[in-house]
Image (cartoon, rainbow, N blue to C red):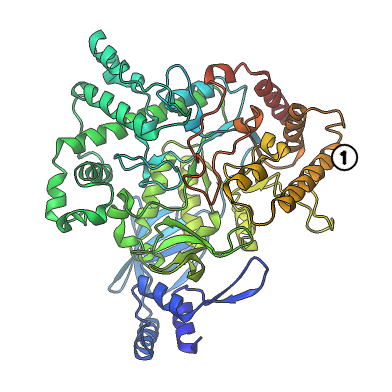
Amino acid sequence: MDAELTALAEAHGVATWYEDWHRERRDVSSESVIGVLALLGVDASSPASIKRELAAIRAAEEQQRLPGTIVVRQGETRPLPGPGRVVQEDGTTLEVTGITADLPLGWHRLSVGDQEVTLVVVPRRLPEPPEAWGWMIQLYALHSAASWGMGDLGDLRTLVEHSHGADLILLNPLHAITPTTPVQTSPYSPSSRRFANPLYLRVADTDAYRRAGAELQARVDALRPGPTADGLIDYSAVWEAKRAALELLWPLAGEIDVDADPGLTDFATFCALAEEHGPNWHDWPEELRRPDTPQAQEARKSERVAFHVWLQDLLNAQLDAANEAARAHGMPVGIVHDLAVGIDPSGADGWLLQDVLAAGVHAGAPPDAFNQLGQDWGLAAWRPDQLIATGYAAYRDMLRRIFRHAGGLRVDHVAGLWRLWWVPPGMGPAEGTYVHYDPDAMLGILALEAGRAGAVVVGEDLGTVLPVVTETLEDMNMLGSAVLWFTRDYEDDPDEGYLPAARYKRNALATISTHDLPTAAGFLAGEQVKVRAELGQLAGPVEQERANADKDRAQLLARLTEEGLITAESTPEEIVVAMHEFLARTPSRFVTASLYDVLGELDQPNLPGTTDEYPNWRMPLRTALENIGEDPRVARVAEVLSARRSR
C-alpha cells in the first residue's frame, strides 16, 4: 500500500493489515481503506487529497490543538499547552497550568486559550467483584400463567423470588424495538440500546390496569394471545396484543410529563413517526430524516409521543420492582443486563444518533475458521472521531440509562471497545478492516458510570481477542468470560483437552455454554451436528463433524472423571450436574447456570449463520415458570453452586 495512504490510515485509527485466525498477516486492500476513511469524513480518493489530509493533520499538531475530549485516570497528571481553567462537575472552577492528580472523578470542562473541551476523570479500576453465583436466562423464554406469549418483567420478579439463594440473574439484552410489525426477533439487533423493550411489560402490573374497572380489565384480559400452532414465540402477535391492551388503558394513565426527559421524548417521537411512516427512517419523507428538522420537532407534540413516553415509564417502574425484589432477597449483585455490540441502523438510535454513527457502515467480523467469508452483523458503529468531538455524550447517556436498572452489565464482544471490524457500503464482509477506538476512554467511561451505579462489569472476550483485552479487563477489575466448551489446555496438552478446574481464570464469569452454543444436553447428544447437518450448515463432511463432536464429548467426560465427578455409570442428568460441580470448583469469581442446561433442553437459543432456517430466539423453555422453582434439578444445581461460599 502507498506509504502516504498508510500514514493517513494510521492517523485515523484505520488498520491496513491485521492478524487472521491462523496468526498470519493479512493486508487490507487500498479500496477498503479508502472506503472506511471516507466514512470518517477523510478524503483519500486521490494522491492529492491524501497529501491535503496529511497536511491538515500536521498543521493541527503544530497548533497544539486539544482533542474534543481528554480522558485521564484519577491521580494522573498531564501538561497543557498553556494556562487553563477547569469547571468541575459540581460547578466549581480551578485555574490550572496542567491536569493535576487531585481532580475528582467525573465530567468536567477544560478551557485553554480559545479551546474548550470535555475532561473526564475516570477510576483506575472498579472495586473487586464479590464471589457470586447465579442464573443465566433468556427472559423471553420464560412463560407462566400470568405472562402473555413470552417471558416478561413479572416473570423476572417471580424468578428472583424463587432463585434458591442466587446472587445474580444474568439476562439477555432488553433493548428497545421499533414498535411496528413484524417485530425484530434478535435481542442483539435493537432499535435503541438506551431504552427498554415494551414486549417485556406485564400489563396486569400497571397502575392503569389496577385502576380499571372489572369490565375494562376483562376486555384487556381477553386480548391475551393463545398458544401458537408451532409452539414458538410470535413476537408480532405479542406486541399487537399488548399494544392494544395498553391503548385501552391509556385513558387511565394520568398526566404524562413529556418534557421531563428530552432524550426519552426524542425516542418516543421516533416511535410515533415509525408507526406512521414505517420502521426504516431512511424511507421517511426527507424532511423527517433528521430529528432536528422543524417537522420532526413539531411531531413531538403528538399524543402518540406521550403514549410511548408512558410505556417507558411503565418499563422503568417494572424494572425497578425487579431490582427491589433482588435487594429484598439479599442478592449482592442483583440483575445483570446485557449490552448488545450495536444497533439496527434503521432504528431509533440510528435516527437520533446519526451524527456520531458511521453512515452506511456495518459492524462485523473478518473471516475465520467457522465463517470463512467473514461476518456482516448489519449493525451500526460509533464514529470514534465524533465520540471524541462530542465528549462521548451519547456513549455516556447509553450507559447511564442501562445502569439505572442494573447491578451489573455484560458487554457483548467487549473487544469492540478497542477495535471493530467495519464493512463499507457495497463491499462484502471479508473486504472490511478494523477501526480503532480509544480503549482508555471507552473502558474508563464504562468504569466511571459502573462505579457510580455500584455495578459490576463482565466483558465477553471469547474467541480470538488481543491479549491486551483480557489483561486490561483484569487490571480494571472487570470480569472476562470462561465457557466450558472453549476452555482448553492449549499449553500442556497436545490433544487440547479441557482445562482442569483449578486452572480457570480467577477474573472471569464461568459458564457451561452461551446462547450461541450447544446446551449441555445438546452437547452430550451431539445435537449441534445433527441440526447443522439437516440445515446444510456444516463446515466439513458430516462424518468428520460427528467424529470431532465425539472426541470433544470424550475429552469432557475424561476431565470430569479425572476430577472425580462422574463414573462410567453416570446418567446424562448426573453428568450435567457434574459440569456445574466442575464450574463450582473453579477459582472464577462468578459462575452462572443456564436454565437451558439445568432443565435438559436440547435446542440452543440461537444458531449463528442461520435466519429463517432455525427458530432463533423464538423457542420457549419446555418447563413453565411455576414448575422451575420446584424442579429438583434446579434445586440440586443451586445446592452445588451455593456450596462455593463455604470454600
The answer to which image quadrant residue 526 occupies is: top right
- The residue under the point 63% across, 75% down is 25
Measured from the top left, where is residue 577 in percent x and y?
A: 74, 29
Q: Is residue 66 above or below residue 177?
A: below
The local crowd at label 1, few if under 14, some if 14 to 19, many if 20 or more residues have their Cα within 10 Å, is: few
Depth order, front residue of 629/86 = 629
Of the residues shown, which amino acid type is indicated by label 1?
Answer: Glu
- The residue under the point 49% across, 43% down is 338
Measured from the top left, where is residue 494 in percent x and y?
A: 84, 58
Residue 111 seen in render: yes
Q: Which residue is mark 1?
A: 562
Q: Is residue 46 above or below residue 311?
A: below
Q: Is residue 64 above or below residue 591?
A: below
In the image, 294: left or right of 191?
Answer: left
In the image, 184: left or right of 620?
Answer: left
Residue 40 seen in render: no
The answer to which image quadrant residue 565 occupies is: top right
- Total number of numbered discs in the rendering: 1
In the image, 552: left or right of 469?
Answer: right
Depth order, front residue of 475/518 = 518
Q: Secondary structure at mark 1?
A: helix
Q: Is residue 462 above or below residue 518?
A: below
The C terminus lies in quadrant: top right
Measured from the top left, where is residue 345 in percent x and y?
A: 35, 55
The residue positioned farthest toward the top in the image shown: 214
- The residue under the point 16% across, 51% down is 296
The answer to which image quadrant residue 11 occupies is: bottom left
Measured from the top left, where is residue 256 in percent x and y?
A: 20, 31
Depth order, front residue of 272/63 = 272
